[in-house]
Image: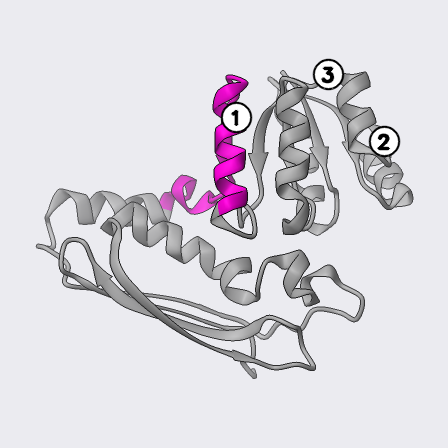
């Protein structure tokens, strides 16, 4: 399988590294608007570098691509990949809005393409063990779920993560999305939900702290929180 990576910053670089280690995959190319970044990663993993992912799709014709560009560009890059006949693994969050997500899903179906969002918790042994234990009923029926994410993270000056538009929000969209997906996977869907956030302007435009609370379809309560302002 020929695979390419669109966007090889910190996360996309990891995609490239892992693809290069898989015997059944040929990492044929990488693309990044910062051409020197693309060239550096391409050289490290013997992949052709491109500054324009559309040219990559046209010339390399990959079977599948990883999309790891800023969230605001996910739909555009995915649509281009679908039109080129490439299956898509897109980094979380999937997009900035349900409208963008729906457009991606619709286009994938129309082109007969597989679209997967990179929620890696579903493939982690420890999280899969939790899923199995809860599903088995061995601990009874859960009536309260609590999931947390805590770290001290302030995006560097100039980082796209500081932009609420490019990121699609703040820390909830960036990282709590993993816990949200895990809750839906393990416990089911939410019936109603509320959220409170705190923005720390000197850190980023979006929220740096957020709390989500709600009731699930099965009657259980749930609380999810993220704090990017922890002090060690």
Query: Does 70 sit left or right of 144 as displayed?
Result: right
Q: What's the distance in space between the residues labelled 1 and 2, CA to CA?
A: 26 Å
Residue at image x 62%, y 15%? Answer: 1
* Disc nearer the start of the sequence (1/3): 3
**In the shown orientation, is residue 202 left or right of residue 198?**
right
Left/right placement of residue 80 relative to residue 131 reads right
Which residue was labeled with disc 3?
61
Furthest residue toward right: 36
- Which tag, 2 or 3, sits closer to the chain's start? 2
- The local crowd at label 1, few if under 14, some if 14 to 19, many if 20 or more residues have their Cα within 10 Å, is many
The numbered mark, 1 or 2, whose residue comes first in the sequence reads 2
Q: Residue at x 71, y 51 (%)?
A: 10
Which quarter of the figure has residue 206? bottom right
Label 3, secondary structure: give it.
loop
The residue labelled by disc 2 is: 49
Which one is closest to the eye, mark 1 or mark 3? Answer: 1
SS for tag 1?
Answer: helix
Residue 22 shown in magenta = no
Q: Which residue is drawn at the image coordinates 65% and 72% (left, top)? A: 205
The residue indicated by pointer 1 is 108
User: Which of 89/2 is in front?
Assistant: 89
Q: Which residues are magenta?
A: 99-125
Residue 165 drawn above or below residue 212:
above
Tag count:
3
In reply to whether residue 121 is colored magenta, the answer given is yes
**Residue 176, percent from left and from top:** 46, 61
Q: Residues within 10 Å of mark 3 (few under 14, many from 20)?
A: some
């Amino acid at each position: 399988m020929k695979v390419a990576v669109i966007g090889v910053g910190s996360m996309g670089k990891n995609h490239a590294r892992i693809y290069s280690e898989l015997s059944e995959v040929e990492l044929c190319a990488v693309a990044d608007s910062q051409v020197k970044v693309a060239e550096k990663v391409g050289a490290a993993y013997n992949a052709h570098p491109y500054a324009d992912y559309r040219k990559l799709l046209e010339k390399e014709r990959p079977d599948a691509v990883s999309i790891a560009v800023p969230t605001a560009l996910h739909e555009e890059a995915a649509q281009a990949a679908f039109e080129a006949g490439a299956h898509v693994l897109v980094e979380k969050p999937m997009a900035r809005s349900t409208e963008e997500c729906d457009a991606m899903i619709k286009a994938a179906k129309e082109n007969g393409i597989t679209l997967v969002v990179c929620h890696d918790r579903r493939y982690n042994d420890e999280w899969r063990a939790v899923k199995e234990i809860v599903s088995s009923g061995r601990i009874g029926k859960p009536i309260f779920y609590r999931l947390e994410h805590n770290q001290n993270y302030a995006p560097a000056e100039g980082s796209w993560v500081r932009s609420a538009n490019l990121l699609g929000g703040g820390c909830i969209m960036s990282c709590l999305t993993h816990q949200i997906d895990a809750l839906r996977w393990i416990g089911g869907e939410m019936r109603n939900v509320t959220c409170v956030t705190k923005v720390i302007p000197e850190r980023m435009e979006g929220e740096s702290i957020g709390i989500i609370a709600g009731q699930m379809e099965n009657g259980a309560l749930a609380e999810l929180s993220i704090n990017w302002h922890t002090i060690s």
